[in-house]
Amino acid sequence: MNDTPARLLTLLSLLQTPREWPGSELAARLEVSARTIRRDIERLRVLGYPVEASLGAEGGYRLVAGAAMPPLLLDDEEAVAIAVGLRAGAGHAIEGVEEASVRALAKLEQVLPARLRHRVGALQSATVALTRGDGPSVDPRTLTTMAGAVAGPERLRFAYRARDGAGTRRLVEPYRLVSTGIRWYLVAYDLEREDWRTFRVDRVSEPFATGARFVPRELPMEAAAFVRRGLQGGETYPVEVSFAAPPQELPGWLRESAVAEGEGSRVCFESGDAPEWVAARLALTGVPFTVRGPESLVRSARTLAGRLAAGAGAAAGTGGPEGDGAGRA
């Protein structure tokens, strides 16, 4: 075998079998000299594959565990078996392996030949997994599409079914996939609503990456904490805020409940979020505002404004909190 890359791949495939290979047998299999085998073994070592050589007349070789995980070569049966296992782990949010399953499945299915994809799909459709909990199963193709869009990063379109059954079309900038061990959630920035949203993946259909790249926005908290906050629910409270801008200039999540008031606007809505989070979101609008109520939000806005002013003063070398804040209480 004179093609060096092809010979190296064949040699690696043989060495991945859990046995020791005499140098003479490898040479016979690849139809090359023992000297060429020794050179090829050294090439594999340079590439990061830990090949161990044993002493003796034959000089055997075997692949051993190393400090890092090198790329693996899989035959058709092995690839199908791993893909089916990963789909089961990803689609049912098995605690402890779900996120790693999605990442590995996305990498594997990217290079899986069409004939093997068909075999994986046929095998999965003919089997049923019994899983703990009441979490719904998720199509692994939906997860891998989302995972690829997060890694891209690419904007993502999909159809979404709300809790009341109403259907909508969404265009988002995907940020993270989060598993609770029972359900999968997508944390993303909804471009139409101009706000962060959490989507249950089992309610998503027809997802596809648009190919449009974007610069990821910064979520004000960890993705897992964002999902957890949304799941906790709790009582809501009325919020009233005045903005120094007309309704059409406000972000989408405020515009729906805004009414014109003089040259500005007044917004009233119900919130179940912590006052500190609401104050931060209001500040991120970049529009001067005044909180009218409730008192807990007034205090949070006042505290946030003080911190921002103090930080700006320190950065300017003034050491004081002077300056105009975006929000007033």
Image (cartoon, rainbow, N blue to C red):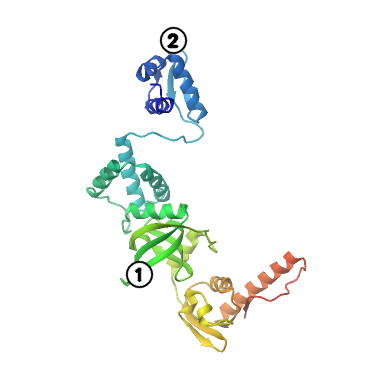
| Residue 218 position in % (x across, y down) | 55, 61
Name the residue tied to disc 1. Answer: 168
Front in this rendered view, residue 281 or 173: 173
Q: Is residue 265 above or below residue 318?
A: below
In this rendering, position of residue 319 left or right of residue 300: right
| Residue 267 position in % (x across, y down) | 51, 82
Q: Quadrant of residue 184?
A: bottom left
Badge 2: residue crowd in 10 Å (few <14, some 14–19, many ≥20)? few
Front in this rendered view, residue 261 or 78: 261
Q: Residue visible at 40% across and 45% down?
A: 107
- Hey, what amino acid is under mark 1? Thr
Q: Residue furthest right?
A: 318
Name the residue tied to disc 2. Answer: 57
Q: Residue visible at 40% across and 64% down?
A: 199
- Hey, what amino acid is under mark 2? Ala
Q: Residue visible at 60% across and 76% down?
A: 301
| Residue 157 position in % (x across, y down) | 39, 62
Q: Secondary structure at mark 2?
A: loop
Q: Residue visible at 66% across and 75% down?
A: 325
